[in-house]
Amino acid sequence: MTLYRADPKHGVAWITGGSSGIGRSLAKDLAAQGYV
């Protein structure tokens, strides 16, 4: 199986539920990686 790795230079990440819990943690992690 091929592993796909997203590159923050190629777009944005859209996260719902980013104000708390897992969504917030994911949003903070992706922002640290350069996603907007």
Image (cartoon, rainbow, N blue to C red):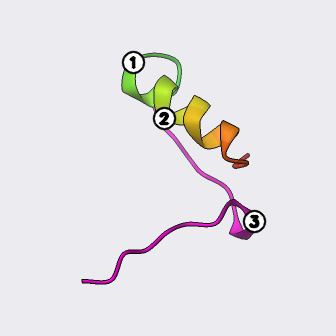
Q: Residue at 68% of width from left, 37% of height from top?
A: 32
Which segment did they paint magenta?
1-16
Amino acid beneath label 2: Leu
Q: Residue at 60% of width from left, 42% of height from top?
A: 30
Q: Name the side, left or right, on which 1 lies relative to 27.
A: left
Cα gap from disc 3 to disc 1, whole angstroms:
26 Å
Cα gap from disc 2 to disc 3, whole angstroms:
18 Å
Q: Name the side, left or right, on which 7 lies relative to 34.
A: left
Q: Name the side, left or right, on which 30 lies relative to 32.
A: left
Q: Name the quarter where the N terminus is drawn.
A: bottom left
20 to 13, vertically: above or below: above
Percent of width and height locating residue 23 = 44, 29
How many neighbours does mark 2 have within 10 angstroms: few (below 14), some (14-19), or many (20 or more)?
some
Query: For the residue labelled by badge 1, is the local secondary structure a helix, a strand or a loop?
Result: helix
Q: Dots 2 and 1: beta carbons under 8 Å? A: no
Residue that carries the numbered disc 1 in the rendered image: 21
In depth, the one of 4 and 13 nearer the eye is 4
Mark 2 / mark 1, whichever is N-terminal: 1
Residue that carries the numbered disc 2 in the rendered image: 26
7 to 26, vertically: above or below: below
Mark 2 / mark 3, whichever is N-terminal: 3
Q: Residue at 53% of width from left, 19% of height from top?
A: 19
Quadrant in which residue 21 is drawn: top left
Report the residue that reaches farthest toward the left. Answer: 1
